[in-house]
Amino acid sequence: MRLSLVDPPKVYLSADLGSSASKFFYRLQSGQTAPIWMGAEVVEGLTSAILNGFNAGGRPQDNAWLEVDGNVVMVGEAAKAFLESNSLSANKAEKAVYKLAAMLGAIAELEQLPSRYEATIWLSLPLAEIKTRHEIAEKLQSLCQRGFTFQGKAQQPAVTLKCFPEGFGLYLHRKQQLERAGEKIDLRPTSIVMMGHRNLSILSFENGSLNLAGSASDGPGFWPIFEKAARSAGMTVPDYPALLRALSSGNAQQISPARASVFDFSAAMAAVQSAYGQAVTVYLRDNLLGRVLEGSVDILISGGAFPMIRPQLKGFFEEIHCGERVTLVEGDDGTLTDVVRDLPESHQLPTLPLRMMDGYGLFLGLIGKLPSTAAPR
């Protein structure tokens, strides 16, 4: 499919900038659904001298670096080697802008785009950070208007950005599922519980609209509880990744770097699950139980942390007699599984489809809004 010689290429991009990884889906040509998984690290304020020994081979998303106003910014996997030398701490809005710019640069490299193109972006933000959406949009548009380089190649895209609360993509995906079954989500009050590493949020929808009064985003994050419980169980930092693998896979037997041998992490797993499970169920009882008691409501549970305490969650909802109204979003959507199957990360992370569900739903909403003539010809 050839792009018009008159109109600039148009990129449609959904972005979910998690604290552990950034998840993207983009479309350039009609029918395309391209997933990208990128590291979450950002290091800015570096000098161009560091590029002398930098190897930019491989996938552009793995070796992403920008030059912005004379400074070098490393993003994703490329940033890990420079974390110790980062003397400036970018705020969350700036980090989001750098991640989005790096992804646009990576797409331009993958698709061999010219320096000028158009990009429509739907961005997922934690509800507590949605107030930064105007700052992110202004900073991104300013950066793109001035221009930047990605891996030494000039970029000057014309960008339109729209932000949505984390979990909104799941709502859009659920809406599509119900429509295929001949049902309307507007008639079904819905609460979406997003259990992330930073925090837990609840999005409540009534009559097809987000009810901010019934929503919250100050719930317990998995990572702070994990660290505290792991330390209490005698774990040291080198063993944290192994303990995480044990929790996510359910297999307590993992190689312990601290011990240089296979180790049974059962005790540490139980400590983390108990602490996190208790914190989550207390929060849900305080913030969701009232809505459940008011009447029939569909409850969707998602986020990268919920599989860690799946049994506790099922037990909690059975206790309050609404287990039949709860859906644990496992990321087992057949279409999504097919889309992400070729990502190398999918073989390393069994929970990858689950963690990309929100961004995928947002992408479906984005391309569903496109007029029939919007796709490049």
Image: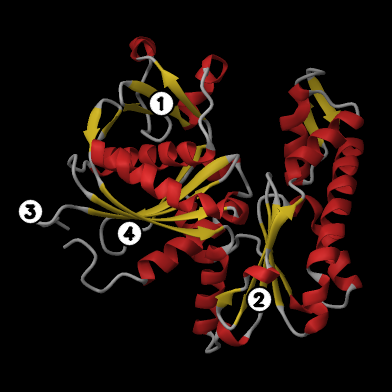
Which tag is nearer the camera, tag 4 or tag 2?
A: 2
Type of amino acid under label 4: Gln
Query: Residue extending furthest left?
Result: 5
Which tag is nearer the camera, tag 4 or tag 1?
A: 1
Type of amino acid under label 2: Thr
Which tag is nearer the camera, tag 3 or tag 4?
A: 3
Rendered location of residue 321, percent (x, y)? 87, 78
> For numbered disc 1, what is the local secondary structure?
strand
Q: Residue at 58% across / 83% down in the picture?
A: 207
Which residue matches tag 3?
5
Lower position in the chain sequence, tag 4 or tag 1: 4
Which of the 4 quarters of the picture holds residue 97?
top left
Q: Which mark is residue 190?
A: 2
Badge 3 density bin: few <14, some 14–19, many ≥20, Cα 10 Å: few
Q: Which mark is residue 32?
A: 4
Q: Residue at 81% across / 63% down in the picture?
A: 284
Give the Cα distance between marks 2 and 3: 46 Å
Which residue matches tag 1?
73
Which quarter shows the C terminus?
A: bottom left
Q: Camera-side residue: 257 or 375?
A: 375
Is residue 272 shown left or right of residue 216? right
